[in-house]
Image (cartoon, grey):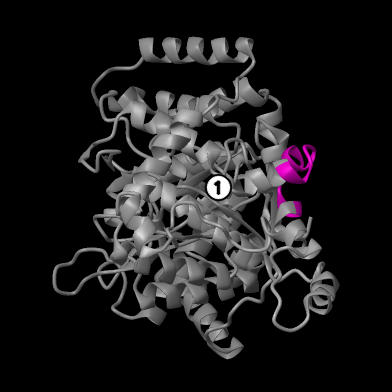
Amino acid sequence: MSTTDTVEAELSPVHRRGGGRIGRKALRGAPMASFPTLVRNIPVYEIVPDEAVELIHDESLKILEEVGCEFRDDEAISMWKAAGADVSGTRVRLDRALLMDLVAKVPSEFTLNARNPDRTVQVGGNNSIFIPMYGAPYVRDLDNKRRYGTLDDLNNFHKLAYMAPALHSSSSIICEPMEIAVPKRHLHIIHSALKHSDKPFMGIVTSKERAEDTMAMAGLVFGEEYVKDNPVLVAITNCNSPLVWDATMLDAMKVYARNNQPLILAPFALCGASTSASAVGAVAQVNAEALAGVAFTQLLRPGSPQLYGQFMVTVDMKTGAPMGGTPEAAQMMYLMGALARKYSLPWRTSGFHVGSKLNDAQAGYESNMLMHAAILAGANYIWHAAGWLEAGLTCGYSKFATDCEQLVGWYKYAGGLPFDDFQEAMAAIREVGPQGHFLGTEHTLKHFESAFFMPSVMDFNSFEQWSAEGAKDHDTRGSEKARNMLKDYEEPKLDEGIAEGLRDFIAQREANLSDTLN
């Protein structure tokens, strides 16, 4: 359904079946609400002319032809040799014709399936989906204390992701459950994502065996044969900038690509440290790294769905620390979007990734800078869209809740301006005439709940009313929102046989895994 329709109509069929009242309730953020895939109906913003995009493209291909990219894995090297690449040790130099032939095999759009079909989404084209953050060792809890994450926290964040209408995935490692031994941790991460939400999720990539366990658990939920061909998860693989795809990432790539599960091929670039101190130069390098990864997936399984990706933050040249929502990060996002469209590749970027330690004004400024760029650059998979603080070291409960509310606004913004009630609005002007008001008109009564973005965490009351209600700041209201959401949570139950199968699988795998890394 086009997002030029009214927001009430944009809600998923689950909510439309109940009629307008239920649809409007869902828009306000009630539990179980879920927006369908966002179809962008606003134009993309081109920050540079086509000639500049072509220049970056050409330089990226020269990097791969003349410098090459490391693939530190024997099987990968054998496959590149068989494909006709110029291989010297682990260095692979790629002829542009070979490279672009492989990249062209990636579909421009794919379906990402959820265990609840109403949560299934489309990735690529004019579609965008929002995904919460990933990988934080710390949390900023409901009492605003910074501490290590636990499994209870991870469960809570998966519950919040499930309940947030504008989040389209539950991610996976929103925070690390630090009390669980690393060799066994992945089992509980994936179990939490599958148990507490019925939206799509993300895979584990820290070893071949953990990726295989992820696929086995997905097979228990979706069917073993089904997950061999149908995307049910997305996994992230990072190139080590500059120009190294290491064995761990390549092992995960093999597991997921051979099972037709999409990977994000995303260089992790600290611009100025692992790239040159140039936004345009950094994009040329990252583009080369990403294309090399995308091409390799097509050696593994031609035609498998993949995501062209990037994670690019600038480095504070005073301290060496990664920075969040800088103008250069936004500019680089626009360039990557233009390149993705040139290659007809679905692409991932990050939305609300910030450097601020708290859910404060700095976090808001940084978030807006990057999400605006992600939307106008045409990103398809907008990751780190809820919870991110402190350059990804921390996931905040308050930040998670306030980000989720903002995503509803971005959903409306990117969906474009609807004209379906325009003539009714014109009739209301004639009905009211001069010096009247519109509060009691038929048009207002029909549309007042869906006409405008109506946040519940942001406060627009008078100073007196705000003071009477406790003079709470935005961070405090965000924590209260998260608490209330968790109180209202109702688990989307798995079939008991499937639930038991997952528990048995975890128990069997844990019996064979050490509590310490070898």
- Magenta-colored segment: predominant secondary structure: helix
Q: Which residues are magenta?
A: 9-21
Is residue 20 found inside the magenta-colored segment of the image?
A: yes
- Relative to 161, residue 287 above or below: below
Residue at screen point 42% across, 24% down: 187
Q: Is residue 22 left or right of residue 327?
A: right
Residue at mark 1: 167
Is any part of residue 249 visible from this angle? yes
Residue at screen point 60% across, 37% down: 199
Between 202 and 294, the residue placed more toward the observer is: 202
* Residue 433 picture location, percent across and down: 78, 81
Residue at screen point 57% across, 84% down: 54
- Relative to 94, residue 468 above or below: above
Task: Tell me where residue 479 sits by quadrant.
Answer: top left
Task: Tell me where residue 267 sits by quadrant.
Answer: bottom left
- Relative to 437, residue 240 above or below: above
Q: Is residue 425 left or right of residue 400?
A: right
Q: Quadrant of the N terminus?
A: bottom right
Q: Is residue 108 left or right of residue 283?
A: right
Is residue 58 found inside the magenta-colored segment of the image?
A: no
Q: Secondary structure at mark 1?
A: loop
* Residue 16 picture location, percent across and down: 77, 43
Residue at screen point 55% across, 10% down: 500
* Residue 335 picture location, percent across and down: 50, 76
Between 291 and 83, the residue placed more toward the observer is: 291
